[in-house]
Image (cartoon, rainbow, N blue to C red):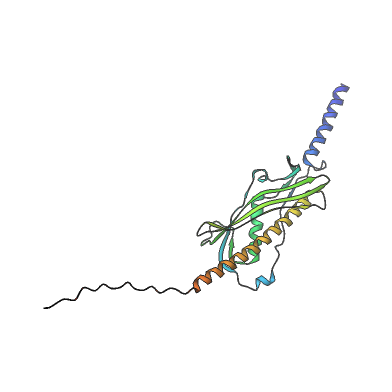
């Protein structure tokens, strides 16, 4: 009987320890939900200039399989990937990032219209992207936030990619806690989208400059083809 009690207690203690290890929650087992969030920077100098006369649709970004879920992903090594059991994203990561990119681009006011709706009419450009890493990385005694993603700007009339850029950045955490991971991932996303907005603004200036140059080129006069008159009639 004593052996049974001791064995039961041992299993209980071992099970509690395993649960704590899996959740990385110090045994609290309290679910916390997080979102990526930041205030898009405002370029007051750019706001003095009118926006480009173009309508942009921000599509849902794609995301690689390990990051589709709501659990926050962490890596203990290059070959090991795990998730927090009680530290979750409040939204699906692909929607969360797509929404933040939309908000940032809209608030930058460099385009006439920026939309997330698929029903928007007269779309000139489509901004799409791919998320390949959204995670915590543990290296020795340090923790890092890791964000890897790409964006593509597509001319909706020709379906050609007119701009593309990729990011693969890490930021060391000040505190070893999930909230610090989310805060640093938000900062990395802000930096990436800020660079994207600057690139797109320059791209549109280049496109407009080329368009003006082409419209100002002198048009060559087209000469009418010679008229072949019939030979004169001889009335002799």
| 185 vs 192, nearest the viewer | 192
Where residue 33 appears, as percent x and y from the top left, is 73, 49
- Image coordinates of residue 6 in percent, x first then y, are 87, 26
Which quadrant is the N terminus positioned in? Answer: top right
Residue 30 vertical position relative to residue 156 in the rendered view, above or below: above
- Residue at image location 49% in from the left, 73% down from the top: 217
Question: Residue 184 falls in which quadrant of the image?
Answer: bottom right
Q: Residue furthest top?
A: 1
Q: Residue visible at 65% across and 58% down?
A: 101
**Residue 139 in the figure: left or right of residue 164:** right
**Location of residue 232 (image quadrant):** bottom left
Q: Residue furthest front?
A: 236
Q: Does 224 appear above or below 21?
A: below
Q: Is residue 159 left or right of residue 14?
A: left
- At x 80%, y 38%, the residue is 21
Residue placed farthest to the right in the image? 2
Q: Image check: 37 left or right of 218?
A: right
Q: Residue furthest bottom?
A: 236
Q: Position of residue 15 (x, y in %)?
A: 80, 33
Which quadrant of the rendered structure holds the C terminus? bottom left
Q: Residue at x 71, y 64 (%)?
A: 41
Q: Position of residue 222 (x, y in %)?
A: 38, 73
Q: Is residue 209 above or below residue 177?
A: below
Q: How many marks?
A: 0
């Amino acid at each position: 009987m004593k052996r049974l009690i001791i064995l039961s207690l041992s299993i209980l203690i071992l099970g509690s320890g395993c649960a704590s290890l899996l959740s990385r929650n110090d045994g609290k087992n309290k679910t916390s939900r997080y979102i990526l969030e930041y205030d898009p920077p405002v370029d007051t100098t750019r706001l003095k200039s009118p926006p480009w006369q173009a309508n942009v649709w921000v599509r849902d970004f794609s995301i690689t399989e390990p990051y589709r879920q709501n659990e926050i992903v962490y890596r203990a090594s290059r070959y090991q990937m795990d998730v927090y059991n009680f530290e979750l994203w409040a939204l699906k990561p692909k929607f969360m990032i797509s929404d933040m990119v939309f908000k940032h681009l809209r608030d930058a006011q460099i385009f006439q219209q920026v939309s997330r709706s698929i029903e928007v009419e007269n779309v000139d450009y489509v901004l799409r992207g791919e998320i390949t890493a959204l995670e915590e990385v543990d290296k020795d005694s340090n923790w890092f936030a890791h964000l890897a993603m790409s964006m593509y700007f597509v001319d909706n009339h020709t379906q050609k990619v007119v701009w593309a850029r990729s990011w693969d950045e890490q930021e060391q955490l000040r505190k070893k806690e999930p909230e610090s991971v989310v805060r640093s991932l938000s900062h990395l996303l802000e930096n990436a989208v800020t660079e994207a907005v600057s690139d797109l603004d320059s791209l549109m200036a280049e496109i407009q400059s080329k368009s003006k140059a082409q419209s100002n080129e002198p048009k060559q006069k087209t000469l009418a083809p010679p008229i072949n008159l019939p030979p004169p009639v001889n009335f002799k």
